[in-house]
Image: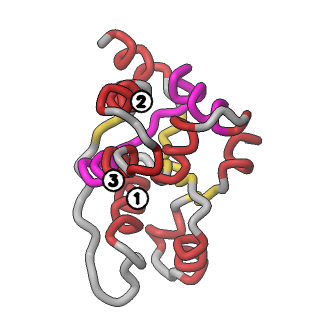
Amino acid sequence: MSRVRSAAKTASRPVVIDTPLLLRALLCTDEQAQALRRGWQDGRWLPRVSPDSATRLMTALAFPRFGLSLAQRQELLADFLPYAQALRPATPKSGRGSAPTPAHADLLALALEGETAELISHDALLTQWLARSRSADIKRVGLRRLEEFLAL
């Protein structure tokens, strides 16, 4: 429990990390994946999660191709969730100009909650949609690829 408080106090950058990159950080040992993981564990940034994004992460960790036991999945979640800020962002408005998928809408809502957070994603559809958006709110979201984010 003290880990959570110390990480939240020292975090200077709120971030929203899409599920594929979270999985990479939790399951892979390459330098970028480990740098992302160390960043939230060291309190350099504070990942934001919603109930929906946490569910997506838990569902993805249970995919048979990963071959993870329940205990392994719980251990991986314990390496992330205690460092994250849990939020219930406002439900994004649907209709013209809405995000391409509910998962994208959730990521954007998390990024726009309170102090605008950086959004880290390699999702081409989301990148294209953000580039075409005319919404002033959406333009506040700083979308970065992992390499670009880590280089800052």
Q: Quadrant of the C terminus?
A: top right
Is 124 above or below relative to 109? below
Q: From the viewer's perspective, tell me whether residue 104 is left or right of residue 95.
A: right
Q: Which residue is mark 2?
A: 76
Q: Quadrant of the N terminus?
A: top left
Q: Residues in magenta?
A: 33-56
Q: From the viewer's perspective, tell me whether residue 119 is left or right of residue 48.
A: right
Query: Tag on residue 107?
Result: 1
Query: Magenta region's main secondary structure?
Result: helix
Three-letter code for the amino acid on which mark 3 is drawn: Arg
Tell me which colouring the rendered structure shows. Answer: secondary structure
Q: Which residue does the image show at 39% across and 42% down from the upper left?
A: 48
Mark 1 vs mark 3, CA separation in Å: 11 Å
Q: Which residue does the image show at 27% across and 54% down from the upper left?
A: 52
Q: Which residue is mark 3?
A: 56
Are the residues flagged by discs 1 and 3 in contact, CB closer than 8 Å?
no
Q: Which residue does the image show at 43% across and 25% down from the upper left?
A: 79
Q: Is residue 114 magenta?
A: no
Front disc: 1 or 3: 3
**Residue 25's x, y, as percent?**
56, 38
Three-letter code for the amino acid on which mark 2 is drawn: Leu
Q: Is residue 34 magenta?
A: yes
Are the residues flagged by discs 2 and 1 in contact, CB closer than 8 Å?
no
Mark 2 vs mark 1, CA separation in Å: 21 Å
Are the residues flagged by discs 2 and 3 in contact, CB closer than 8 Å?
no
Q: In the picture, residue 49 is in which quadrant? A: top left
2 or 1: tag closer to the N-terminus: 2
Three-letter code for the amino acid on which mark 1 is drawn: Leu
